[in-house]
Amino acid sequence: MENPVLTCCPFRPEDLDAIDFRGVERRLLAGAGDWDAYRSALANCWRPQTGWVDGVPVGCAGILGRHGGVGEAWVLLSESLPIDISTGREARLWALLTAAVRQNLRAALDGPFHRIEAHVRVDFPAAVRWIEHIGGFVFEAPEIAYGTDRSDYFRFARISPSVFQERSAP
């Protein structure tokens, strides 16, 4: 079994057209409103990336700047990424994706952000498990009717270690 090779490239709005999104992402994108504005917002966020495996885009991710050093992490994934990642090539691919996301989060918290939030659909348990697996995020609150389709979400946050260092300094 061949090991997957993940290549991360700067996100381009047209990458969204090449990704075969899963149902949950398709529903999210359907509620995005002005498609061109949405694509532009994602392209203009902090270090947006598209992940490619064997010449096929498997997802994109980035961090939207909100206000005063607060960012919102976003990830949109392809249908080609299986949810059952316990063994084999898929497990190695998810390990690569997780490592890339962790690296970007560390850079973001060492850079312009002191807090990064992640909003995860309640009815998507695999995404909840993944955000917990990435590490460093803490569950903060349920968000009732948070989605554009009024779906419920969980809010997780990851705080820069510098915040705690500043608070404990004399």
Image (tube, grey):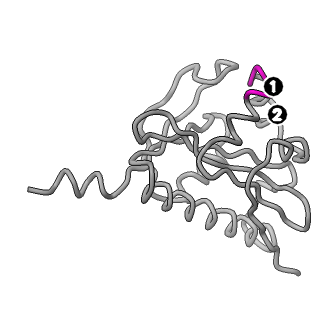
Q: Residue at x 64, y 64 (%)?
A: 100
Q: Between residues 115 and 12, which one lies in front from this camera angle?
A: 12
Q: Is residue 53 above or below residue 150?
A: below
Residue 80: in magenta span: no
144 relative to 65, above or below? above
Stretch in magenta: 32-37
- Residue 115 percent across, percent down from the top left: 41, 45
Horizontally, residue 44 falls left or right of residue 52, namely left
Tags 2 and 1 touching, CB below 8 Å: yes
In the image, what residue type sits under mark 1?
Ala
Up-down: is 20 above or below 133?
Answer: above
Residue 47, percent across and down? 62, 53
Q: Residue at x 77, y 21 (%)?
A: 34
**Residue ID at (76%, 20%):** 33
If the image is split into quadrants, where does the N terminus sit? bottom right
Disc 1 secondary structure class: helix
Residue 121: which quarter of the image? top right
Q: Amino acid at mark 2?
A: Arg
Binning the other alpha carbons within 10 Å of mark 1 as few (below 14), some (14 to 19) or many (20 upward) gives few
Q: Quadrant of the C terminus?
A: bottom left
What residue does disc 2 label? 26
Check disc 2 and report its element: helix, strand or loop. helix
Quadrant in which residue 43 is drawn: top right
Residue assigned mark 1: 30
Q: For label 2, count other residues whose C-alpha is less than 10 Å away and answer few (under 14), some (14-19) or many (20+).
A: some
Which residue does the image show at 57% across and 60% down from the upper left? 104
Say how many tags the image has.
2
